[in-house]
Image: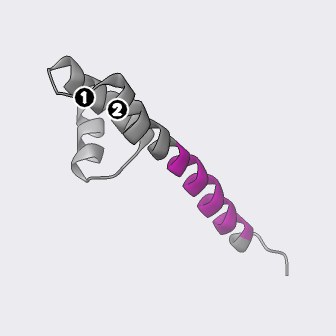
Amino acid sequence: MIWLPVSTFFALALEHSIVNTFVIPTAMILGADISVQQWLLWNAIPVTLGNIVGGSVLTGLLLHYCNKTH
């Protein structure tokens, strides 16, 4: 059941920590030449930080703009 939405999001080439937490370990299990250290250093940490910053800043700014009382 979860394969279709996750695969669709991944096929759109969107970087998201949840998708990468699913897809990259699956590739590792299937034999991809990726170590856990490489995955954490070059993907999981930067993408998660980007999601946190992008989500909080962009969502926060949009909500602030839409709900201004002035």
Left or right for 53, reference 6: right
Is residue 48 positioned above or below 35 on the image?
A: below
Residue closest to the eye, 65 or 38: 38
The residue that appears at 33% across and 52% down in the rendered structure is 14
Query: Which portion, as a residue range, is magenta?
Result: 49-64
- Pointers 2 and 1 in contact (CB under 8 A)? yes
Left or right for 49, reference 38: right
Does any portion of residue 2 appear in the rendered image? Answer: no
- Chief SS of the magenta region: helix
> Any magenta on residue 40?
no
> Any magenta on residue 61?
yes
State the SS at label 2: helix
Residue at the disc numbered 1: 34
Residue at the disc numbered 2: 38
The residue that appears at 79% across and 74% down in the rendered structure is 68
State the SS at label 1: loop
The kind of residue tagged 1 is Ile
